[in-house]
Amino acid sequence: MSILENREKLFSNPNFLDWKFQLQNRIRANDLEKFFNLSENEKIAIKNSIRLNIGSTPYYLSLSDPFDEHCPIRKTIVPNIGETIFSKEESKDPLHEERLSVVKGLTRMYDDRVLLFSNQDCSVFCRHCMRGRKVSYNDQRMETNDLENVFDYLKQHPEISDVVISGGDPLNLSDSKFEFILKNLNEIESVKICRIGTRNLVTLPMRITDEVCRIIEKYNNNNLSIFCNTHFNHEKECTELSKKAILKLIKAGVSVGNQTVILKGINDSGEKMLSLHKKLLEQRVRAYYMYDPELIPGSKDFRVPLAKGFEIIEYMRGKISGMGIPHFVNDLPGGGGKITLTPEWYLGFHRETRSHVFLSALRGTYHLSPEVEGSEYDLKYKEIPNSLWEKIRLNFKTAHVA
Ligand code: SF4
């Protein structure tokens, strides 16, 4: 059968909208040639990838282009040639999540927040996954007793109030296992916030069933507030089905935010990020983070210069409301935690006139704002260099004052 016939047969299956059918019929490495006209580079990468296993739901595959190697969805499913090279600056665990693990499956980078690795499975094994050292490998499964050890640790550390459940995808667990986790978190008095990290809104939206919503609603109560962070990277991922899934979660009282990663050839331009975030707002998803890509093995073909992130944020500012502009963040290599990075819109402080100098993101013009009278913070501000002050003064004379 031809590639198009194979696709047609799979996508017209009467069970296509059933999430269990989707997981049971995931496309694996050996199936890719049935659904894509693979290039020589892709064939080599499939054979020699040093990254996580290959897998995609039929639904996510249906969003991809079988003939265009540059299709953003295809690049998420099919390995690229960069995946075969472990570059010297890369590391299996750049964020030191294992070093910072306090019990199996629990990473503690901050005093009050932890990351619970609930599950090694995902609906799609994204080629850019930063946790590719664990995800897709069955020996990384979290057993019930591992989860019980996590809950014991949380009980012994009441200073921890916020638990991110991620992995892997917690919504790839069975309903009963997912409920087991929420029930236990809900019973720990000191845990107030639970953030579910799931990409199933993108890759398996039919997983947001009435039953999943019922479970979430049950534990989204006075003791525990449940949030959801998802991971859309490209406008093509925003479909009617994903919108329906998001609205179901919102009806269950969960607000949904998006974390995207800047990926070369997928979304590394202001225009692409703007279209994505406009579409997300239409789907009622607020922007949360935009990550600088991690230094994980085989990621060289996805990584972009740091300046790209500034360029994207500069481009977006003024073209979409603040709800649609993500924080540009770098999760620091070596386990330093996240930092936010912003373009240089605050240029500095002119001590003599006690003025702060700003650059308008919208118009590219200089703007002054006086420091509060009597403030003792003057020495805390970076001083604006004289040469720049002179330029600004001249600019003001011609552009605003004259
Ligand atoms: S869904 Fe998330 S955790 Fe799973 S493979 Fe994709 S990026 Fe990694």
Image (cartoon, rainbow, N blue to C red):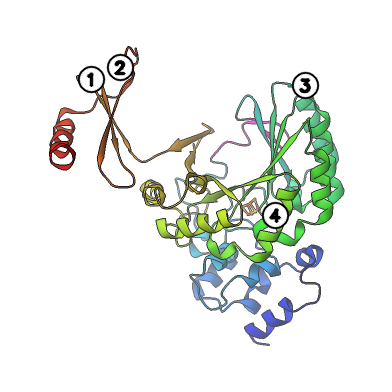
Q: Quadrant of residue 47?
A: bottom right
Q: Residues within 10 Å of mark 3 (few under 14, many from 20)?
A: few
Name the residue that disc number 3 marks.
156
Q: Secondary structure at mark 2?
A: helix
Residue under numbered circle 4: 247
Q: Would residue 107 be counted in the magenta stretch?
A: yes
Q: Is residue 388 above or below residue 23?
A: above
Q: Are marks 2 and 4 in contact (CB under 8 Å)?
A: no
Q: Earlier in the sequence, mark 3 or mark 2?
A: 3
| Label 1, residues with CA under 10 Å away: few <14, some 14-19, many ≥20 | some
- Decide which of tag 2 and tag 1 comes sooner along the chain: 1
Q: Earlier along the polypeptide chain: callout 4 or callout 3? A: 3
Residue lying at 61% horizontally and 70% vertically, measured from the top left? 63
The mark found on residue 351 in the picture is 1
Whether label 3 lies within 8 Å of ligand 1 gets the answer no
- The residue pinned by badge 2 equals 378
